[in-house]
């Protein structure tokens, strides 16, 4: 019988609080007419996306690899505020890298792309339909409400030191896309671990486009990048004790839809 890996997947990531700096504030609304504000903030603690020209970015978006381009950002929790008319409203804080913010401020194409991705991210995370067509950047306000701390993930400290990983074997594995279309719904990885006795000795870390597997003590080490962006929080894994096969089911993020 299959057995779930202890601690589920992915392993809890370490986090740290940051206090972002204000950037600009935009006003938009949901499909139901609810007014919302999005505070675009900046912080050096957020990684910067690849430094591409507009031409390179346009070619990437039009290619089959469009879904692989990501802008790292932190989506804060909603907070209730009062607008200038005294009416209640909801504000969301979106934090990006400071250097990328500065570049975006003088690049309208990049700004519109970022805002499209940010609106889609907020809509997906908080299950609402935000208009990414009818938004307006406020001229005299950089922030709605108060700047709140955000918790961001930090890379976990490696448990196995570099000298140990060299003696670990790279396991055999296969990754299948289901369905086999240009943008599948999920990826299924099957990793053969014939020397593993217990899942207690397995450590699986997932990023949006990376799989890192360690089998202690010094048995296996797998570190690969995958050609799609997955949803680590919804990924599940099972280890079959008889076949010694670890199966990892990874939902694939929805493709980027540009207006």
Image: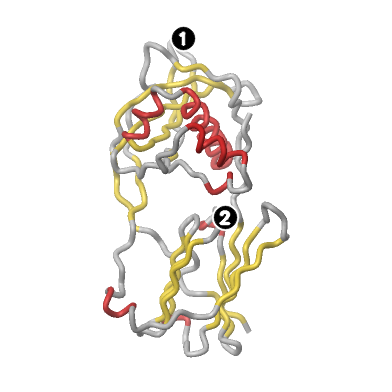
Task: Residue lying at the far front in this picture: please name it.
Answer: 55
Q: Residue placed at 45% from the left, 31% from the top?
A: 92
Quadrant in the picture for residue 138: top left
Whether residue 160 sits left or right of residue 259 in the image: it is left
Across and down, in percent, residue 12 comes to 40, 61
- 167 and 198: which one is in front? 167
Task: Quarter of the image for the C terminus: give it.
Answer: top right
| Tag 2 near tag 1, CB within 8 Å | no
Quadrant in the picture for residue 214: bottom left
Task: Quarter of the image for the N terminus: give it.
Answer: bottom right
Helix, strand or loop for disc 2 = loop
Helix, strand or loop for disc 1 = loop
Dot 2 surroundings within 10 Å: few (below 14), some, or many (20 or more)? many
Across and down, in percent, residue 60 comes to 56, 41
Whether residue 84 sits left or right of residue 131 in the image: it is left
Quote the CA–CA distance across marks 2 and 1: 45 Å
Which color scheme is applied?
Answer: secondary structure
Disc number lying in front (2 or 1): 2
Dot 1 surroundings within 10 Å: few (below 14), some, or many (20 or more)? few
Label whose residue precedes the other's in the sequence (2 or 1): 1
- Label 2: which residue? 228
Per the rendering, the mark at residue 85 is: 1
């Amino acid at each position: 019988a299959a057995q779930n890996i202890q601690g589920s997947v992915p392993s809890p990531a370490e986090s740290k609080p940051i206090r972002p700096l204000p950037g600009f504030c935009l006003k938009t609304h949901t499909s139901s007419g609810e007014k919302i504000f999005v505070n675009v903030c900046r912080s050096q603690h957020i990684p910067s996306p690849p430094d591409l020209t507009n031409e390179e970015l346009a070619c990437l978006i039009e290619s089959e690899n469009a879904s692989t381009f990501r802008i790292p950002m932190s989506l804060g929790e909603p907070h209730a505020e009062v607008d200038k008319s005294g009416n209640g409203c909801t504000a969301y804080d979106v934090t990006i890298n400071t250097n990328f913010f500065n570049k975006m401020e003088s690049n309208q194409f990049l700004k519109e792309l970022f805002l499209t991705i940010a609106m889609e991210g907020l809509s997906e995370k908080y299950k609402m339909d935000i208009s990414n067509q009818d938004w307006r950047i406020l001229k005299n306000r950089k922030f709605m409400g108060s700047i709140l701390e955000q918790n961001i993930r930090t890379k976990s400290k490696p448990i196995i030191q570099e000298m140990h990983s060299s003696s670990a074997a790279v396991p055999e594995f296969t990754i299948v896309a289901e369905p086999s279309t240009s943008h599948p719904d999920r990826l299924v990885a099957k990793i053969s671990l014939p020397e593993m006795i217990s899942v207690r000795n397995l450590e699986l870390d997932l990023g949006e486009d990376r799989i890192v597997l360690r089998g202690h003590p010094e048995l296996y080490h797998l570190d690969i990048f995958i050609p799609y962006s997955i949803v680590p929080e919804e990924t599940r894994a099972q280890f079959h004790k008889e076949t010694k096969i670890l199966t990892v089911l990874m939902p694939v993020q929805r493709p980027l839809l540009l207006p």
